[in-house]
Amino acid sequence: MVIFIKVVQLLFALSILVIVHEFGHYIFARLFKVRVEKFFLFFDWGFSLFKRKIGETEYGVGWIPLGGYVKISGMIDESMDLEQMKQPAQPWEFRSKPAWQRLLIMVAGVIFNVILAIFLYTMVLNVWGETYLASKDVKYGIVTDSTGYAMGLRNGDKIISLDGTTVENFYRIVPDILLNDRKTITVDRDGQMITIPIERRFRPVLMKGKGEIDARIPFGPFVISDFAKKESPARDAGLLAGDEIVKLDNLEFKWYDEFQSYLKSHKGVPVTLTILRGGKSIDIPVKPNEAGMLGVARSAKNVLQLTTVHYNFIQSVPAGIKMGVVTIGDYLKQFKLIFSRETKGYESLGGFITIGSIFPGSWDWMAFWKLTAFISIILAVMNILPIPALDGGHVMFLVYEVVTGRKPSDKFLEYAQIAGMVILLALLIFANGNDILRLIRK
């Protein structure tokens, strides 16, 4: 069921984004009196699920959910309709229009995706506001893993700044280290300010999701709120929601991470939990699973103080614009990491499985619209890359025409389109191949 919900969210989001993107091309083409022959959601190679012709345009839904397209008369695109290009240019065709009009038609899809993302961010901020864990409110310091220890961090450290700059949102710290190439971390360790250099050898490790830096929380009160659906040794042993765990093998813990470490050192080994149920103390033997987990969820109410900023409509507009601009900037910075031999970011490149996995397993409208806005930014940035077959490839040739006054030949554009399609297919195979390899390695 979880996978089904994720797939539905992904397809719904992609449908919205493709329609908006292609509508940008469509509306500007019609504005400049260019004929649009087809407007399709998804690709219809071979056949379509639905189609209907209204006026000069055929509207439809294809069967391959990898995007969508508008077929504009007199333009070399993914349809590779070369017969049309052999005929004399007609006034209603793309190739007959001035370069500046063709340029606007090609960038319109990207512009509409950016506008959609900003609109969605604005609506989300207006309806739900923005909730995050402020770095200043991580009052118990951090908890980190072996990579964090190797970097020089210690459990209980309070992160003050990166290169002297305070990071407001605690969970932006690791992305900030990577995207802004931070050199130092300043921490408060038991009242002493320590500046730790960030060695470059840790960047590839952080890119792969290691080097965990999380907020440290106390062990108690540890009240069970739920159990893991697939495997829960605690539930099988007879624990109930509402039970409070107070001891493990008669040991008391100050910090939750110490409790977790003890369990991981006893994988598959029976332990004794001391719980409070109805005011009575009960000892229950439990055998942690092979991952050293009990399969319980704890109530985190009042453990950490979250900050929520509410916006009225007027306030949400500039805040939504800022969120969109920051997201675009961050995504552009990621390209340096993806193509860097040092970080090997290309190993983290993912396809549809990766994109689908970022959606929650249950329907959450706030998360859905925020993720749709984020994917809209991704679609805009990817489409403006100067690769033939993408909007950015067409824009590159049009800018060349505007600057030089010379238009590339149709034969050149034909070969460039084919080369671009080969490049995109290779990237598609590589990204989705990474997804499959990650699934196999799990």
Image (cartoon, helix red, strand yellow):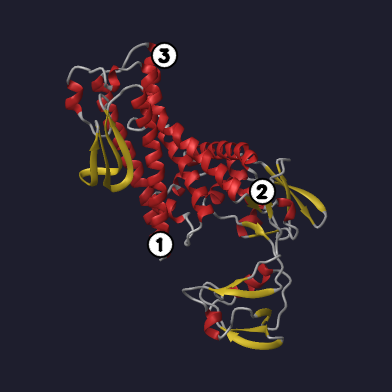
Kindly report which numbered mark, 1 or 3, lies closer to the viewer in this rendering.
Answer: 1
Kindly report which numbered mark, 1 or 2, lies closer to the viewer in this rendering.
Answer: 2
Kindly report which numbered mark, 2 or 3, lies closer to the viewer in this rendering.
Answer: 2
| Mark 1 or mark 2: whose residue is earlier in sequence | 1
**Which residue carries the number 1 mark?**
3
Residue furthest out toward the front: 55
Q: Please identify the quarter of the rendering in which residue 312 is found.
A: top right
Report the front residue among 233 and 129: 129
Three-letter residue code for mark 2: His
Mark 1 to mark 3 CA distance (whole Å)? 50 Å
Left or right of 241: which side holds 290? left
Dot 2 falls on a residue whose secondary structure is loop
Three-letter residue code for mark 1: Ile
- Would you say residue 5 is visible in this rendering? yes
In the depicted structure, whether residue 262 falls above or below residue 385: below
Q: Which mark is residue 403?
A: 3
Please state the horizontal and vertical placement of residue 32, each as a whole percent of the image. Answer: 35, 21
**Which residue carries the number 2 mark?**
310
| Mark 2 or mark 3: whose residue is earlier in sequence | 2
Report the front residue among 191 and 171: 171
Please state the horizontal and vertical placement of residue 193, each as a whole percent of the image. Answer: 80, 49
Left or right of 259: which side holds 85? left
Q: Please identify the quarter of the rendering in which residue 274 is found.
A: bottom right
Residue drawn at (56%, 80%), measured in percent from left and top? Answer: 234
Please state the horizontal and vertical placement of residue 363, each as a whole percent of the image. Answer: 48, 59
Dot 1 falls on a residue whose secondary structure is helix
Residue furthest out toward the top: 405
Left or right of 407: which side holds 324? right
Report the front residue among 393 and 159: 393
